[in-house]
Image (cartoon, rainbow, N blue to C red):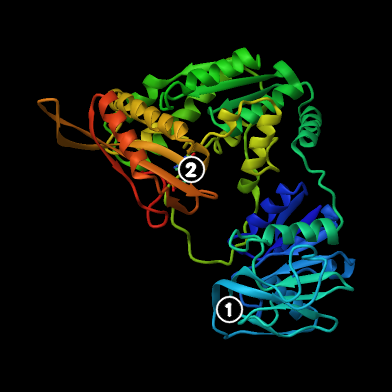
């Protein structure tokens, strides 16, 4: 495996995702606990991430000495390069012009790091983001790549197998960065691609059996990919010792609740309790316009309903959750100010403590794309595993101004037509998330010979990597025209459609 030591870069997770994509297992640990992680994992290679600190500051992060003493190959990126250089006896200076963005690296010497795709004398685009720079290399290092502002863009010590780059290979703006990371793990560290979802499936099944024994497990199904994959995997491991509880809040998209129920009951034969709690949820939301109150109400009711059902079932010791790796990665904090809550995401995080249950979390080691691959491995249809993300509070947060049954119905129909058009145009997989929002605004229209006075529907579609930042999707105007015409013709209650061209930031993806 590979240990990634996190020095606080915004893009550390991308390093892990790139490695996982090539079939290599890796874990991210903050520099503060990297020594323990190194001892436990016994990785064959280590990667130092970038980070926001300056190595010239007193008390700035360092890599554990054990890593250097062990003799494993190291790839050190940006801040990682600087701390490695300093810890190996080189010099680093601050106060240079900060350099962000694209640069060209010119290759001076060959290296196994880019064997086969970068040639001596060639110039290749890379992404830089740094303030300090190494001014004197430690003994034994040679410069093998330079750029205009980075004389040590790539510096290596082939004997020790230390490879350092001033640029970020993990971001898409370094087009050959993925190949570079692959070269490091396959050619230099010598790891094979044995991290596959079919191997994972078997290991996870064994682990679940060992943890649960003859115990009983309940799983709160949300209808989303994560909890579904977790449930199917657990069912494969322990069969009917698992019961799924699907709290149906009535805020799902068209036909979604039925699809989930029939998939579990008919296709997988998994015991499923379908609690139709739509009246309860919609009743509590009626007249409530504040987004945060909506979320809190939904979260509270969800826990109430789930607890009640769990009591009826009686005696389960384990609670299954579809927790993913990004939720468990400990993040490096540099005691910045308190962060602001933009939106309080509703999840079942409050459940286990309240109910005094042990957690079964078979997806804790996986990234989202790996969960999708595992879902396919378990026989879930592509259409299901490839679905766009959908928020826990569902359509409630796509009805600014308040939830009513009528509005839910209008929104659901508009959303279904919109998504249908997206699929027909072959755009579904090019978009990260797309949905309709029903605005609490009525406008005048003319249909046939009559005047209409109906609601406005806003369409949203974004591209994104992880939902943290997003760009609006640049549709062709003909597509928007088609979708708008169908929505207005087929959905009573809507007479105008607009398209949201806000990116995130400054907007958020959802409207509430
Ligand atoms: P925002 O709107 O914050 O959305 O830009 C980022 C991603 O998070 C989803 N989202 C939520 N998911 N509970 C969830 O489970 C929530 O309350 C919630 N709010 C937003 C949103 O759909 C997008 O994928």
- In the rendered image, the vertical position of residue 8 relative to residue 284, given as above or below: below
CA gap, disc 1 and disc 2: 34 Å
Is the CB of the residue bearing disc 1 within 8 angstroms of ligand 1?
no
* Sooner in the amino-acid sequence: mark 1 or mark 2: 1
260 or 61: which is nearer to us? Answer: 260
Q: Position of residue 266 (x, y in %)?
A: 61, 12
Residue 393 image-quadrant placement: top left
Q: Residues within 10 Å of mark 1 (few under 14, many from 20)?
A: some
Q: Residues within 10 Å of mark 2 (few under 14, many from 20)?
A: some
Residue that carries the numbered disc 1 in the rendered image: 131
- In the rendered image, the vertical position of residue 1 relative to residue 391, given as above or below: below
Task: Find residue 239 and name its label.
Answer: none
Q: Secondary structure at mark 2?
A: loop
Q: Position of residue 216 (x, y in %)?
A: 70, 21
Q: Secondary structure at mark 1?
A: loop
Q: Residue at x 56, y 29 (%)?
A: 383
Q: Residue at x 43, y 39 (%)?
A: 434
454 or 341: which is nearer to us? Answer: 454
Q: Is residue 67 left or right of residue 322?
A: right
Q: Position of residue 171 (x, y in %)?
A: 61, 60
Q: Position of residue 238 (x, y in %)?
A: 75, 21
- In the rendered image, the vertical position of residue 337 relative to residue 95, given as above or below: above
Is the CB of the residue bearing disc 2 within 8 angstroms of ligand 1?
no
Q: Residue at x 53, y 27 (%)?
A: 223
Residue 35 visible, this angle:
no
Q: Residue at x 48, y 54 (%)?
A: 469
Residue 310 image-quadrant placement: top right
Nearer to us of marks 1 and 2 is 2
Residue that carries the numbered disc 2 in the rendered image: 431
369 or 223: which is nearer to us? Answer: 369
- In the rendered image, the vertical position of residue 499 relative to residue 76, given as above or below: above
């Amino acid at each position: 495996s590979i240990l990634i030591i996190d020095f606080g870069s915004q893009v550390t997770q991308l390093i892990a995702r790139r490695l996982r994509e090539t079939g290599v297992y890796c874990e991210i640990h903050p520099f503060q606990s990297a020594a323990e992680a190194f001892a436990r994992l016994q990785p064959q290679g280590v990667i130092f991430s970038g980070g926001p600190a300056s190595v010239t500051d007193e008390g700035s992060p360092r890599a554990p000495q054990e890593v250097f003493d062990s003799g494993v190959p190291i790839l050190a990126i940006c801040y990682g390069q600087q701390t490695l250089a300093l810890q190996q006896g080189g010099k680093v200076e601050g106060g240079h012009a900060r350099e962000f963005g694209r640069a060209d690296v010119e290759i001076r010497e060959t290296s196994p790091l880019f064997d086969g795709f970068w040639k001596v004398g060639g110039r290749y685009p890379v992404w830089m983001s740094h303030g300090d720079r190494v001014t004197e290399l430690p003994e034994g290092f040679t410069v093998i790549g330079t750029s205009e502002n980075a004389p040590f863009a790539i510096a290596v010590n082939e004997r020790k197998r230390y490879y350092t780059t001033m640029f970020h290979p993990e971001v898409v703006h370094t087009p050959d960065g993925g190949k570079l990371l692959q070269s490091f793990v396959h050619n230099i560290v010598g790891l094979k691609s044995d991290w596959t979802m079919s191997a994972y499936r078997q290991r996870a099944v064994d682990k679940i059996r060992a943890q649960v024994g003859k115990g009983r497990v309940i799983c709160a199904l949300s209808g989303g990919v994560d909890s579904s994959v977790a449930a199917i995997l657990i069912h494969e491991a322990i069969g009917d010792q698992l019961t799924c509880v699907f709290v149906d809040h009535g805020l799902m998209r068209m036909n979604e609740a039925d699809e989930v129920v029939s998939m579990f009951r008919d296709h997988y034969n998994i015991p499923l309790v379908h609690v139709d709690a739509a009246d309860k949820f919609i009743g509590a939301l009626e007249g409530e316009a504040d987004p945060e109150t909506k979320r809190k109400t939904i979260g509270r009711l969800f826990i109430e309903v789930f607890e009640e059902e769990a009591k009826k079932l009686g005696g389960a010791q384990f609670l299954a959750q579809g927790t993913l790796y990004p939720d468990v990665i400990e993040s490096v904090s540099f005691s910045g100010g308190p962060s602001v809550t933009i939106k309080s995401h509703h999840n079942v995080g409050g459940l286990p403590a309240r109910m005094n249950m042990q957690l079964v979390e078979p997806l804790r080691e996986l990234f989202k794309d790996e969960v999708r691959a595992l879902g396919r491995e378990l026989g879930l249809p592509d259409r299901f595993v490839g679905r766009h993300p959908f928020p826990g509070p569902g359509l409630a947060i796509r009805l600014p101004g308040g939830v009513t049954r009528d509005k839910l119905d209008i929104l659901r129909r508009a959303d279904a037509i919109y998504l249908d058009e997206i699929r027909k145009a072959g755009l579904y997989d090019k978009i990260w998330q797309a949905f309709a929002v029903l605005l609490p605004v009525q406008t005048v229209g003319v249909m046939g010979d009559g005047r209409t006075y109906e609601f406005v529907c806003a369409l949203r579609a974004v591209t994104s990597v992880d939902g943290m930042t997003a760009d609006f999707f640049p549709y062709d105007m003909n597509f928007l025209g088609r979708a708008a015409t169908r929505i207005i013709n087929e959905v009573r209650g809507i007479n105008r459609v607009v398209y949201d061209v806000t990116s995130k930031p400054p907007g958020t993806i959802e409207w509430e």
